[in-house]
Image (tube, grey):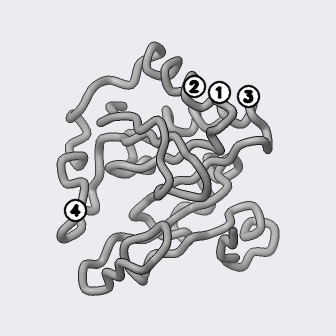
């Protein structure tokens, strides 16, 4: 898997102060995507153990509330094994003290059965739709995208929106 970069402290990519891993690779190619440069799975740099150590260094800080995975698309087919392993390590290290948010162009209905979902706390799903863009939305770019509380949704079998 390749990655585009790491943002050590973000206040807009999920609840609280988040460290964001921007992965490379996306097959959705949404019109007017703000991260078109991340579509190429061979773009950026290789996500190595050294990069993972750097990422966990940011995540270890007390002010950090958790990890946000974005891109590109963390659930792009070739990203899934490494992203799943990373999420598993994260949950082993932080348990419920810190959260994982994941942004994907896939719909919940199409990814809910992936093994990674057992580690995700909040999923922002759906492709960005330029005609549904709304700058007043929190944590998402277009009105079709949903901010899903994954644990509650898995437990109830009905989509539960994340509430701060």
- Residue at screen point 55% across, 28% down: 58
Labels 2 and 4: the sequence-earlier one: 4
Residues marked 2 and 3 touching at CB (< 8 Å): yes
Residues marked 2 and 1 touching at CB (< 8 Å): yes
Please tell me how many numbered marks the rendered image carries: 4
Q: Quadrant of residue 44?
A: top left
Mark 2 secondary-structure assignment: helix
- Residue at screen point 39% across, 64% down: 105
142 is higher (above) or lower (below) than 155: below
Which one is closest to the eye, mark 2 or mark 4? 2
Residue at mark 2: 56
Q: Percent position (x, y) of residue 91?
A: 72, 37
Q: CA distance from mark 2 to mark 4?
A: 30 Å
Q: Nearer the viewer, residue 113 or 134?
A: 134
6 is higher (above) or lower (below) than 53: below
Q: Residue furthest top?
A: 50
Quarter in which the N terminus is drawn: top left
Residue at mark 3: 93
- Residue at screen point 32% across, 31% down: 2
Mark 4, other Cα within 10 Å: few <14 / some 14–19 / many ≥20: some
């Amino acid at each position: 898997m390749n990655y585009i970069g790491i943002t050590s402290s973000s206040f807009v990519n999920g609840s609280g102060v988040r460290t964001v891993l921007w992965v490379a690779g996306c097959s959705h190619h949404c019109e007017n995507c703000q991260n078109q440069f991340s579509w190429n799975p061979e773009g950026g740099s290789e996500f190595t153990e050294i990069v993972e150590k750097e990422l966990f260094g940011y995540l270890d800080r007390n002010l950090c509330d958790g990890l946000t995975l974005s891109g590109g698309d963390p659930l792009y087919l070739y990203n899934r094994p490494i992203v799943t392993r990373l999420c598993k390590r994260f949950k082993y290290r932080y348990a419920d003290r810190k959260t994982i948010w994941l942004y994907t162009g896939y719909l919940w209905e199409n990814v809910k059965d992936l093994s990674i979902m057992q580690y995700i706390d909040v999923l922002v799903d759906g492709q960005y739709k330029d005609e549904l863009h709304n700058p007043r939305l929190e944590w998402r770019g277009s009105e079709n995208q949903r901010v899903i509380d994954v644990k509650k949704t898995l437990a109830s079998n009905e989509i539960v929106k994340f509430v701060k």
